[in-house]
Image (spheres, grey):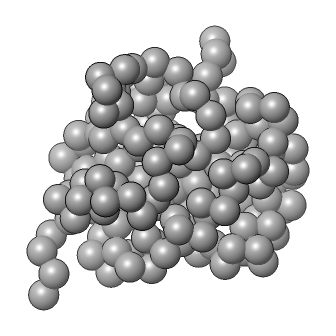
């Protein structure tokens, strides 16, 4: 099974896959609303608005595994994201990204090396995985901002040319 075909559940309880969410590139990000990195939501939404027409989609994956920084219910998470950051991109159900019971998507994502060649567990909230339409994955650690030149270059390379 390709990474884009792994079953997921939306924050509203609907079954889906990354392939159903977007034909183009997808950036999967484990998110949290009470983290020092939470303001990255704003830049993630900017990416969604900037590249959405070209087939790009951000997918937020709430996770409460890092110091309990995403304690809210599905409704609370949706409300926070929409009212605080104007988030329009899809959100998945609260998900385990590490440990024995991690989601199968993250089991695969753990195999992806970052820029230094390191693989393994998600280190913190807002770790980013850019999945190109062909299934290749580029990993960006949490401290890498969504508008970092390396992120923008990877997104641009995974999308069809403008115009």
**What is the residue that sits farthest to the top in this orientation?**
100
Residue 52 horizontal/vertical position (percent): 38, 75
**Up-down relation of residue 50 to residue 135 (above or below):** below
**What is the residue that sits farthest to the bottom in this orientation?**
163
For this view, does 97 lie left or right of residue 46? right
**Up-down relation of residue 76 to residue 114 (above or below):** below
Q: Residue at x 74, y 32 (%)?
A: 66
Quarter containing the N terminus = top left
Residue 90 horizontal/vertical position (percent): 57, 63
**Up-down relation of residue 55 to residue 148 (above or below):** below
Q: Residue at x 31, y 60 (%)?
A: 149
Q: Residue at x 18, y 46 (%)?
A: 134
Marks counted in the figure total: 0
Q: Residue at x 38, y 79 (%)?
A: 50
Residue 16 visible in rendering = no
Residue 163 horizontal/vertical position (percent): 13, 87
Residue 6 horizontal/vertical position (percent): 43, 37
For this view, does 94 lie left or right of residue 137? right
Residue 122 visible in rendering = yes
Q: Nearer the viewer, residue 133 or 161?
A: 161
For this view, does 141 lie left or right of residue 118? right
**Up-down relation of residue 60 to residue 120 (above or below):** below
Q: Nearer the viewer, residue 24 or 163?
A: 163
């Amino acid at each position: 099974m390709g990474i884009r075909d792994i079953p997921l559940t939306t924050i509203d309880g609907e079954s889906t896959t990354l392939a159903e969410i977007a034909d183009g590139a997808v950036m999967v990000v484990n998110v949290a609303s009470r983290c020092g990195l939470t303001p990255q939501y704003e830049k993630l939404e900017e990416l969604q608005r900037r590249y959405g027409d070209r087939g790009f989609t951000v997918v937020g994956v709430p996770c409460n595994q890092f110091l309990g920084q995403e304690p809210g219910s599905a409704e609370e998470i949706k409300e926070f994201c929409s009212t605080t950051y104007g988030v329009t991109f899809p959100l998945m159900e609260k998900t385990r990204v590490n440990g024995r019971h991690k989601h199968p998507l993250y089991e695969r994502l753990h195999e992806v090396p970052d820029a230094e060649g390191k693989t393994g567990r998600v280190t913190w909230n807002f770790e980013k995985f850019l999945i190109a339409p062909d299934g290749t994955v580029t990993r960006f650690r949490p401290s890498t901002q969504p508008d970092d030149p390396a992120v923008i270059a990877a997104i641009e390379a995974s999308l069809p040319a403008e115009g």
